[in-house]
Image (cartoon, helix red, strand yellow):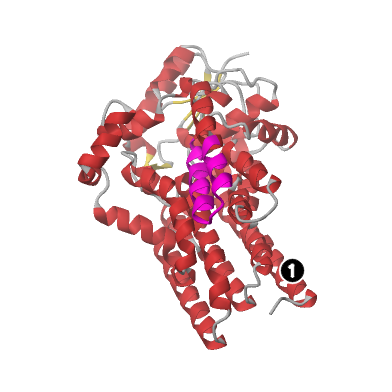
Amino acid sequence: MGFSLKDRSSIERAALIVSVVYAGILFLTAAVQHYLFGTQVWDIGLFEQFSWLIAEGKAAAISSLRQVTPLQDHFSLLLLPLGAIYKVFPSTFTLIGLQSMALGSLPAVVAYLAVKRQIKQLLIWALMCAIVLCPYGFLVNRGDFHPDVLTIPFMIIAIFEATQERRWRYYFCLLIVLFAKNAQALFGLGLGLYAIARSRYLRGLIAIVISIFWWFLATHLSSAGGDHVAIRLGYLGDTKLEMLTTLLVRPWIVFSVASPSDIFLYTLGLSLPFLALLRKPALACLLGAAPVYLVNIISDSGIQRELNHHYSIPILAFLIAGCLDSLPAISVKARHIQKNIFNTTLVLSLVAFLGYSRMIYFKSRYLPRLPEAVAFQSVVSDIGPQESVLASSNYVVHLAGRERISQIEKDDYQQKWPFDVIIFPSEKALINVRGRLREVGKTKVGRKMSRILEEAKASGMTCDQPNSYIRLCRMKE
Protein backbone atom coordinates (compact mmCIF):
# COMPACT_ATOMS: atom_id res chain seq x y z
CA MET A 1 0.00 0.00 0.00
CA GLY A 2 1.44 3.40 -1.00
CA PHE A 3 1.86 6.50 1.09
CA SER A 4 -0.95 9.01 1.13
CA LEU A 5 0.09 12.56 0.31
CA LYS A 6 -0.51 13.50 3.95
CA ASP A 7 1.63 10.64 5.30
CA ARG A 8 4.42 11.37 2.85
CA SER A 9 4.43 15.06 3.74
CA SER A 10 4.40 14.20 7.46
CA ILE A 11 7.41 11.87 7.44
CA GLU A 12 9.43 14.11 5.12
CA ARG A 13 8.72 17.16 7.28
CA ALA A 14 9.70 15.24 10.41
CA ALA A 15 12.89 14.00 8.73
CA LEU A 16 13.77 17.56 7.74
CA ILE A 17 13.40 18.67 11.36
CA VAL A 18 15.59 15.74 12.47
CA SER A 19 18.21 16.75 9.90
CA VAL A 20 18.25 20.37 11.06
CA VAL A 21 18.63 19.35 14.71
CA TYR A 22 21.22 16.67 13.87
CA ALA A 23 23.28 19.11 11.77
CA GLY A 24 23.11 21.63 14.61
CA ILE A 25 24.40 19.09 17.12
CA LEU A 26 27.17 18.01 14.75
CA PHE A 27 28.23 21.60 14.21
CA LEU A 28 28.10 22.49 17.90
CA THR A 29 30.20 19.52 19.05
CA ALA A 30 32.74 19.92 16.23
CA ALA A 31 32.99 23.69 16.72
CA VAL A 32 33.50 23.33 20.47
CA GLN A 33 36.17 20.67 19.95
CA HIS A 34 37.93 22.91 17.43
CA TYR A 35 37.72 25.93 19.73
CA LEU A 36 39.28 23.83 22.52
CA PHE A 37 42.27 22.78 20.37
CA GLY A 38 40.86 19.35 19.52
CA THR A 39 41.55 19.46 15.76
CA GLN A 40 44.75 18.94 13.81
CA VAL A 41 46.76 20.62 11.08
CA TRP A 42 46.34 17.41 9.09
CA ASP A 43 43.81 17.91 7.73
CA ILE A 44 41.53 20.79 8.65
CA GLY A 45 44.47 23.19 8.79
CA LEU A 46 45.62 22.09 5.34
CA PHE A 47 42.19 22.49 3.79
CA GLU A 48 41.71 25.90 5.32
CA GLN A 49 45.00 27.07 3.84
CA PHE A 50 44.07 25.49 0.50
CA SER A 51 40.71 27.29 0.62
CA TRP A 52 42.39 30.58 1.52
CA LEU A 53 44.88 30.28 -1.35
CA ILE A 54 42.12 29.56 -3.86
CA ALA A 55 39.96 32.36 -2.45
CA GLU A 56 42.86 34.77 -2.93
CA GLY A 57 43.40 33.66 -6.53
CA LYS A 58 46.57 31.74 -5.64
CA ALA A 59 45.56 28.21 -6.63
CA ALA A 60 49.02 27.70 -8.15
CA ALA A 61 50.84 28.79 -4.98
CA ILE A 62 52.69 26.27 -2.81
CA SER A 63 51.07 25.57 0.55
CA SER A 64 53.52 26.32 3.37
CA LEU A 65 51.96 23.48 5.38
CA ARG A 66 51.84 20.78 2.69
CA GLN A 67 54.60 21.91 0.26
CA VAL A 68 52.33 21.36 -2.76
CA THR A 69 49.67 23.42 -4.49
CA PRO A 70 46.05 22.85 -3.38
CA LEU A 71 45.15 20.65 -6.36
CA GLN A 72 48.36 18.60 -6.06
CA ASP A 73 47.00 17.15 -2.82
CA HIS A 74 44.71 14.37 -4.11
CA PHE A 75 43.49 16.60 -6.98
CA SER A 76 40.27 17.61 -5.23
CA LEU A 77 38.32 19.75 -7.71
CA LEU A 78 35.76 20.45 -4.98
CA LEU A 79 38.33 22.80 -3.47
CA LEU A 80 37.50 25.30 -6.22
CA PRO A 81 33.87 25.96 -5.16
CA LEU A 82 34.99 25.56 -1.57
CA GLY A 83 37.47 28.40 -2.05
CA ALA A 84 34.69 30.59 -3.45
CA ILE A 85 32.55 29.94 -0.37
CA TYR A 86 35.53 30.56 1.91
CA LYS A 87 36.14 33.92 0.25
CA VAL A 88 32.67 35.03 1.38
CA PHE A 89 32.87 33.37 4.80
CA PRO A 90 36.61 33.18 5.69
CA SER A 91 36.58 31.00 8.79
CA THR A 92 37.42 27.49 9.90
CA PHE A 93 33.84 27.27 11.12
CA THR A 94 32.69 27.61 7.50
CA LEU A 95 34.36 24.29 6.70
CA ILE A 96 32.98 22.69 9.85
CA GLY A 97 29.51 24.04 9.04
CA LEU A 98 29.52 22.69 5.48
CA GLN A 99 30.60 19.25 6.65
CA SER A 100 27.99 19.26 9.43
CA MET A 101 25.27 20.14 6.92
CA ALA A 102 26.36 17.33 4.57
CA LEU A 103 26.23 14.71 7.32
CA GLY A 104 23.18 16.31 8.91
CA SER A 105 21.22 16.06 5.66
CA LEU A 106 21.30 12.25 5.72
CA PRO A 107 18.03 11.69 7.64
CA ALA A 108 16.14 13.93 5.19
CA VAL A 109 17.78 12.32 2.15
CA VAL A 110 17.08 8.83 3.45
CA ALA A 111 13.44 9.61 4.30
CA TYR A 112 12.88 11.02 0.80
CA LEU A 113 14.32 7.89 -0.83
CA ALA A 114 12.56 5.54 1.60
CA VAL A 115 9.16 7.07 0.83
CA LYS A 116 9.79 6.41 -2.87
CA ARG A 117 10.34 2.73 -1.99
CA GLN A 118 7.14 2.50 0.06
CA ILE A 119 8.99 1.73 3.30
CA LYS A 120 6.83 1.90 6.42
CA GLN A 121 7.20 4.94 8.65
CA LEU A 122 8.35 2.98 11.70
CA LEU A 123 11.21 1.49 9.69
CA ILE A 124 12.13 4.90 8.28
CA TRP A 125 12.37 6.14 11.86
CA ALA A 126 14.53 3.13 12.72
CA LEU A 127 16.97 3.98 9.92
CA MET A 128 17.04 7.65 10.90
CA CYS A 129 17.82 6.65 14.51
CA ALA A 130 20.67 4.45 13.27
CA ILE A 131 22.09 7.34 11.25
CA VAL A 132 21.79 9.92 14.01
CA LEU A 133 23.29 7.63 16.66
CA CYS A 134 25.95 6.15 14.38
CA PRO A 135 29.24 6.96 16.14
CA TYR A 136 31.15 7.18 12.88
CA GLY A 137 29.23 10.17 11.53
CA PHE A 138 29.61 11.89 14.88
CA LEU A 139 33.34 11.17 15.14
CA VAL A 140 34.35 11.92 11.57
CA ASN A 141 32.73 15.35 11.80
CA ARG A 142 34.51 16.11 15.07
CA GLY A 143 37.81 14.70 13.92
CA ASP A 144 38.63 17.00 11.01
CA PHE A 145 37.44 18.29 7.65
CA HIS A 146 37.65 16.52 4.29
CA PRO A 147 35.97 17.32 0.95
CA ASP A 148 34.97 13.68 0.44
CA VAL A 149 32.75 13.81 3.55
CA LEU A 150 30.77 16.58 1.84
CA THR A 151 29.79 14.14 -0.90
CA ILE A 152 28.08 11.44 1.19
CA PRO A 153 24.54 12.59 0.27
CA PHE A 154 25.56 12.32 -3.40
CA MET A 155 26.95 8.82 -2.76
CA ILE A 156 23.62 7.61 -1.39
CA ILE A 157 21.66 9.20 -4.22
CA ALA A 158 24.04 7.68 -6.80
CA ILE A 159 23.51 4.21 -5.31
CA PHE A 160 19.73 4.71 -5.33
CA GLU A 161 19.78 5.99 -8.92
CA ALA A 162 21.82 3.01 -10.13
CA THR A 163 18.59 1.03 -10.57
CA GLN A 164 16.38 3.86 -11.88
CA GLU A 165 15.50 4.43 -15.53
CA ARG A 166 16.87 7.98 -15.67
CA ARG A 167 20.61 8.26 -15.99
CA TRP A 168 21.67 11.89 -15.66
CA ARG A 169 21.27 12.02 -11.85
CA TYR A 170 23.32 8.83 -11.45
CA TYR A 171 26.27 10.12 -13.47
CA PHE A 172 26.04 13.63 -12.05
CA CYS A 173 26.29 12.32 -8.48
CA LEU A 174 29.12 9.97 -9.46
CA LEU A 175 31.15 12.85 -10.90
CA ILE A 176 30.56 15.03 -7.83
CA VAL A 177 31.84 12.20 -5.64
CA LEU A 178 34.89 11.56 -7.83
CA PHE A 179 35.80 15.25 -7.86
CA ALA A 180 36.34 15.14 -4.08
CA LYS A 181 39.73 13.41 -4.58
CA ASN A 182 41.50 10.75 -6.60
CA ALA A 183 40.88 7.95 -4.09
CA GLN A 184 37.12 8.36 -4.55
CA ALA A 185 37.65 6.12 -7.56
CA LEU A 186 37.24 3.27 -5.07
CA PHE A 187 33.66 4.41 -4.45
CA GLY A 188 33.08 4.57 -8.20
CA LEU A 189 34.43 1.03 -8.53
CA GLY A 190 32.09 -0.10 -5.76
CA LEU A 191 29.16 1.71 -7.37
CA GLY A 192 29.88 -0.10 -10.62
CA LEU A 193 29.96 -3.47 -8.85
CA TYR A 194 26.67 -2.62 -7.13
CA ALA A 195 25.02 -1.71 -10.43
CA ILE A 196 26.24 -4.94 -12.02
CA ALA A 197 24.95 -6.95 -9.05
CA ARG A 198 21.58 -5.28 -9.57
CA SER A 199 21.63 -6.30 -13.26
CA ARG A 200 22.47 -2.83 -14.56
CA TYR A 201 25.48 -4.14 -16.44
CA LEU A 202 26.16 -1.29 -18.85
CA ARG A 203 25.68 1.36 -16.19
CA GLY A 204 27.99 -0.50 -13.84
CA LEU A 205 30.67 -0.99 -16.48
CA ILE A 206 30.57 2.71 -17.43
CA ALA A 207 30.95 3.71 -13.76
CA ILE A 208 33.98 1.44 -13.40
CA VAL A 209 35.62 2.77 -16.57
CA ILE A 210 35.01 6.40 -15.55
CA SER A 211 36.40 5.73 -12.07
CA ILE A 212 39.55 4.01 -13.35
CA PHE A 213 40.13 6.83 -15.83
CA TRP A 214 39.67 9.38 -13.04
CA TRP A 215 42.10 7.51 -10.80
CA PHE A 216 44.91 7.55 -13.35
CA LEU A 217 44.26 11.14 -14.41
CA ALA A 218 43.93 12.59 -10.90
CA THR A 219 46.84 10.55 -9.54
CA HIS A 220 49.09 11.76 -12.35
CA LEU A 221 48.09 15.40 -11.81
CA SER A 222 48.64 15.12 -8.05
CA SER A 223 51.84 13.06 -8.18
CA ALA A 224 53.77 15.86 -6.45
CA GLY A 225 51.76 15.07 -3.32
CA GLY A 226 53.37 11.64 -3.02
CA ASP A 227 52.55 8.04 -3.91
CA HIS A 228 49.96 7.18 -1.26
CA VAL A 229 49.60 3.61 -2.52
CA ALA A 230 53.33 2.96 -2.00
CA ILE A 231 53.27 4.66 1.40
CA ARG A 232 50.34 2.64 2.76
CA LEU A 233 50.71 -0.66 0.92
CA GLY A 234 54.48 -0.73 0.44
CA TYR A 235 54.86 -3.64 2.85
CA LEU A 236 53.16 -5.84 0.23
CA GLY A 237 55.76 -5.17 -2.48
CA ASP A 238 57.49 -2.58 -4.62
CA THR A 239 55.07 -2.69 -7.56
CA LYS A 240 51.29 -2.99 -7.93
CA LEU A 241 51.74 -6.51 -9.33
CA GLU A 242 53.90 -7.56 -6.37
CA MET A 243 51.31 -6.16 -3.96
CA LEU A 244 48.51 -8.13 -5.61
CA THR A 245 50.61 -11.30 -5.76
CA THR A 246 51.48 -11.02 -2.06
CA LEU A 247 47.81 -10.65 -1.12
CA LEU A 248 46.87 -13.72 -3.15
CA VAL A 249 49.77 -15.92 -2.00
CA ARG A 250 50.19 -14.73 1.60
CA PRO A 251 46.95 -13.00 2.67
CA TRP A 252 47.80 -13.48 6.35
CA ILE A 253 50.54 -10.84 6.01
CA VAL A 254 47.75 -8.29 6.52
CA PHE A 255 47.66 -9.27 10.20
CA SER A 256 51.17 -7.86 10.60
CA VAL A 257 49.69 -4.36 10.24
CA ALA A 258 46.12 -4.95 11.43
CA SER A 259 45.31 -7.50 14.13
CA PRO A 260 42.07 -9.51 13.88
CA SER A 261 40.76 -7.75 17.00
CA ASP A 262 41.42 -4.32 15.46
CA ILE A 263 39.63 -5.32 12.27
CA PHE A 264 36.69 -6.70 14.25
CA LEU A 265 36.30 -3.58 16.41
CA TYR A 266 36.57 -1.34 13.36
CA THR A 267 33.93 -3.34 11.50
CA LEU A 268 31.65 -3.49 14.52
CA GLY A 269 31.82 0.25 15.13
CA LEU A 270 30.83 0.96 11.54
CA SER A 271 28.04 -1.56 11.16
CA LEU A 272 26.45 -2.10 14.60
CA PRO A 273 23.68 0.54 14.32
CA PHE A 274 22.51 -0.93 11.00
CA LEU A 275 22.71 -4.69 11.65
CA ALA A 276 19.03 -5.21 12.46
CA LEU A 277 18.00 -3.42 9.26
CA LEU A 278 20.11 -5.43 6.81
CA ARG A 279 18.70 -8.37 4.87
CA LYS A 280 19.68 -10.41 1.81
CA PRO A 281 18.96 -7.54 -0.67
CA ALA A 282 21.78 -5.61 1.03
CA LEU A 283 24.40 -8.02 -0.35
CA ALA A 284 24.80 -5.89 -3.48
CA CYS A 285 25.59 -2.86 -1.31
CA LEU A 286 28.07 -4.85 0.76
CA LEU A 287 29.76 -5.84 -2.49
CA GLY A 288 29.88 -2.15 -3.40
CA ALA A 289 31.51 -1.31 -0.07
CA ALA A 290 34.14 -4.04 -0.50
CA PRO A 291 36.81 -2.04 -2.42
CA VAL A 292 37.02 0.70 0.22
CA TYR A 293 36.69 -1.74 3.12
CA LEU A 294 39.43 -4.06 1.84
CA VAL A 295 41.84 -1.18 1.19
CA ASN A 296 41.24 0.12 4.72
CA ILE A 297 41.84 -3.34 6.17
CA ILE A 298 45.12 -3.99 4.38
CA SER A 299 46.55 -0.49 4.75
CA ASP A 300 49.72 -0.04 6.78
CA SER A 301 48.22 3.26 7.98
CA GLY A 302 46.16 2.50 11.08
CA ILE A 303 44.16 5.71 10.78
CA GLN A 304 42.26 4.13 7.89
CA ARG A 305 40.67 1.83 10.47
CA GLU A 306 39.88 4.58 12.98
CA LEU A 307 36.37 5.97 13.17
CA ASN A 308 37.44 9.59 13.53
CA HIS A 309 38.90 9.63 10.01
CA HIS A 310 37.20 10.02 6.65
CA TYR A 311 38.39 6.85 4.94
CA SER A 312 35.19 4.90 5.67
CA ILE A 313 32.67 7.45 4.40
CA PRO A 314 31.83 5.37 1.28
CA ILE A 315 31.25 2.34 3.52
CA LEU A 316 28.73 4.32 5.58
CA ALA A 317 26.96 5.34 2.37
CA PHE A 318 26.70 1.72 1.21
CA LEU A 319 25.49 0.56 4.64
CA ILE A 320 22.69 3.13 4.57
CA ALA A 321 21.84 2.18 0.98
CA GLY A 322 21.86 -1.48 2.01
CA CYS A 323 19.23 -0.70 4.62
CA LEU A 324 17.14 1.10 1.98
CA ASP A 325 17.38 -2.00 -0.22
CA SER A 326 16.40 -4.28 2.67
CA LEU A 327 13.53 -2.38 4.28
CA PRO A 328 10.89 -2.87 1.53
CA ALA A 329 10.95 -6.61 2.32
CA ILE A 330 10.59 -5.90 6.05
CA SER A 331 7.75 -3.43 5.42
CA VAL A 332 5.39 -6.27 4.41
CA LYS A 333 5.89 -8.07 7.71
CA ALA A 334 3.60 -7.82 10.72
CA ARG A 335 3.55 -4.62 12.78
CA HIS A 336 5.00 -6.30 15.87
CA ILE A 337 8.00 -7.55 13.85
CA GLN A 338 8.65 -4.04 12.59
CA LYS A 339 8.40 -2.72 16.14
CA ASN A 340 10.89 -5.33 17.37
CA ILE A 341 13.30 -4.30 14.61
CA PHE A 342 12.88 -0.65 15.57
CA ASN A 343 13.59 -1.41 19.24
CA THR A 344 16.58 -3.59 18.39
CA THR A 345 18.01 -0.89 16.11
CA LEU A 346 17.58 1.72 18.82
CA VAL A 347 19.38 -0.45 21.38
CA LEU A 348 22.23 -1.36 19.02
CA SER A 349 22.64 2.27 17.99
CA LEU A 350 22.78 3.46 21.59
CA VAL A 351 25.33 0.77 22.45
CA ALA A 352 27.46 1.78 19.46
CA PHE A 353 27.24 5.47 20.31
CA LEU A 354 28.10 4.99 23.97
CA GLY A 355 30.92 2.58 23.15
CA TYR A 356 32.57 4.47 20.32
CA SER A 357 31.64 8.17 20.44
CA ARG A 358 34.49 9.24 22.77
CA MET A 359 32.35 11.81 24.54
CA ILE A 360 34.61 11.44 27.58
CA TYR A 361 37.31 13.25 25.58
CA PHE A 362 35.52 16.55 26.16
CA LYS A 363 36.08 16.15 29.89
CA SER A 364 39.60 14.71 29.76
CA ARG A 365 41.18 16.46 26.74
CA TYR A 366 39.22 19.54 25.72
CA LEU A 367 37.38 21.33 28.53
CA PRO A 368 40.53 21.63 30.70
CA ARG A 369 41.93 23.89 27.95
CA LEU A 370 38.99 26.31 27.97
CA PRO A 371 40.87 29.13 29.81
CA GLU A 372 43.74 28.82 27.32
CA ALA A 373 41.30 28.89 24.38
CA VAL A 374 39.70 32.10 25.64
CA ALA A 375 43.13 33.67 26.22
CA PHE A 376 44.29 32.56 22.76
CA GLN A 377 41.30 34.10 21.00
CA SER A 378 41.88 37.41 22.78
CA VAL A 379 45.40 37.54 21.32
CA VAL A 380 44.97 36.20 17.77
CA SER A 381 42.43 38.87 16.87
CA ASP A 382 45.41 41.24 16.54
CA ILE A 383 47.26 38.98 14.08
CA GLY A 384 46.58 40.12 10.51
CA PRO A 385 45.90 37.67 7.64
CA GLN A 386 48.96 38.93 5.73
CA GLU A 387 51.40 38.29 8.59
CA SER A 388 53.57 35.17 8.50
CA VAL A 389 53.21 32.99 11.59
CA LEU A 390 55.17 30.30 13.41
CA ALA A 391 53.12 28.40 15.99
CA SER A 392 52.54 25.04 17.64
CA SER A 393 50.28 22.67 15.70
CA ASN A 394 47.24 23.30 17.92
CA TYR A 395 47.51 27.01 17.19
CA VAL A 396 48.29 26.63 13.49
CA VAL A 397 44.85 25.09 12.96
CA HIS A 398 43.30 28.39 14.08
CA LEU A 399 45.60 30.56 11.98
CA ALA A 400 45.86 28.59 8.73
CA GLY A 401 44.00 31.16 6.64
CA ARG A 402 47.16 32.87 5.35
CA GLU A 403 49.94 32.26 2.83
CA ARG A 404 52.89 31.74 5.18
CA ILE A 405 52.43 29.69 8.33
CA SER A 406 54.55 26.91 9.83
CA GLN A 407 54.37 24.58 12.81
CA ILE A 408 57.35 23.94 15.04
CA GLU A 409 56.66 20.22 15.03
CA LYS A 410 58.04 20.25 11.45
CA ASP A 411 61.68 21.26 11.13
CA ASP A 412 61.12 22.98 7.78
CA TYR A 413 60.26 26.17 9.68
CA GLN A 414 64.00 26.82 9.92
CA GLN A 415 64.22 27.39 6.16
CA LYS A 416 61.31 29.85 6.33
CA TRP A 417 62.71 32.03 9.10
CA PRO A 418 62.06 34.89 9.89
CA PHE A 419 58.35 35.20 10.74
CA ASP A 420 56.27 38.26 11.52
CA VAL A 421 54.65 36.55 14.51
CA ILE A 422 55.60 33.65 16.78
CA ILE A 423 52.88 32.42 19.13
CA PHE A 424 53.21 29.57 21.64
CA PRO A 425 51.42 28.42 24.79
CA SER A 426 53.05 29.33 28.10
CA GLU A 427 55.04 26.77 30.05
CA LYS A 428 52.13 26.28 32.48
CA ALA A 429 49.56 25.79 29.73
CA LEU A 430 48.42 22.27 28.81
CA ILE A 431 49.25 20.33 25.68
CA ASN A 432 47.99 16.98 24.38
CA VAL A 433 50.81 14.43 24.32
CA ARG A 434 49.69 11.00 23.13
CA GLY A 435 46.18 11.47 24.46
CA ARG A 436 47.15 12.98 27.83
CA LEU A 437 47.33 16.61 28.87
CA ARG A 438 50.68 17.73 30.24
CA GLU A 439 52.19 21.09 31.10
CA VAL A 440 54.00 22.51 28.08
CA GLY A 441 57.18 23.20 30.04
CA LYS A 442 57.54 19.51 30.93
CA THR A 443 57.46 18.26 27.34
CA LYS A 444 60.07 17.96 24.61
CA VAL A 445 58.14 20.29 22.32
CA GLY A 446 57.83 22.78 25.19
CA ARG A 447 61.60 22.93 25.55
CA LYS A 448 61.85 23.46 21.80
CA MET A 449 59.41 26.39 22.08
CA SER A 450 61.54 28.04 24.77
CA ARG A 451 64.65 27.66 22.64
CA ILE A 452 62.92 29.22 19.62
CA LEU A 453 61.70 32.15 21.71
CA GLU A 454 65.26 32.81 22.87
CA GLU A 455 66.40 32.78 19.25
CA ALA A 456 63.58 35.18 18.36
CA LYS A 457 64.65 37.62 21.07
CA ALA A 458 68.26 37.38 19.94
CA SER A 459 67.20 38.18 16.37
CA GLY A 460 65.55 41.40 17.51
CA MET A 461 61.90 40.38 17.82
CA THR A 462 59.81 41.88 20.62
CA CYS A 463 58.60 39.09 22.92
CA ASP A 464 56.23 39.12 25.87
CA GLN A 465 53.50 37.10 27.60
CA PRO A 466 50.20 39.01 27.17
CA ASN A 467 48.35 36.66 29.56
CA SER A 468 48.88 33.54 31.66
CA TYR A 469 48.55 31.15 28.73
CA ILE A 470 50.14 32.74 25.67
CA ARG A 471 53.70 33.73 24.70
CA LEU A 472 54.01 36.06 21.72
CA CYS A 473 56.87 37.49 19.66
CA ARG A 474 56.54 40.11 16.92
CA MET A 475 58.93 41.48 14.36
CA LYS A 476 59.88 45.05 15.27
CA GLU A 477 58.42 47.63 12.90
Q: Is residue 328 left or right of residue 39?
A: right
- State which quarter of the image contains the C terminus: top right
Q: Amino acid at mark 1?
A: Arg
Q: Secondary structure at mark 1?
A: helix
Residues rendered magenta in the picture? 183-209
Q: Is residue 190 left or right of residue 106?
A: left
- Judged by its main secondary structure, the magenta piece is helix
Q: Position of residue 199 (x, y in %)?
A: 53, 55
> Height in image: 250 above or below 345?
above
**In percent of the image, x 44 and y 68: which residue is there?**
275
Q: Position of residue 85 (x, y in %)?
A: 72, 36
Q: Position of residue 146 (x, y in %)?
A: 54, 41
- State which quarter of the image contains the N terminus: bottom right
Q: Choose top left, top right, bottom left or bottom right for residue 427.
A: top left
**In percent of the image, x 58 and y 75: which residue is there?**
123
**In percent of the image, x 38 and y 43: which residue is there?**
295
**In percent of the image, x 38 and y 38: which residue is there?**
440
Q: Which residue is mark 1?
A: 13
Mark 1 Cα-neighbour bin, 10 Å: few <14, some 14–19, many ≥20: some
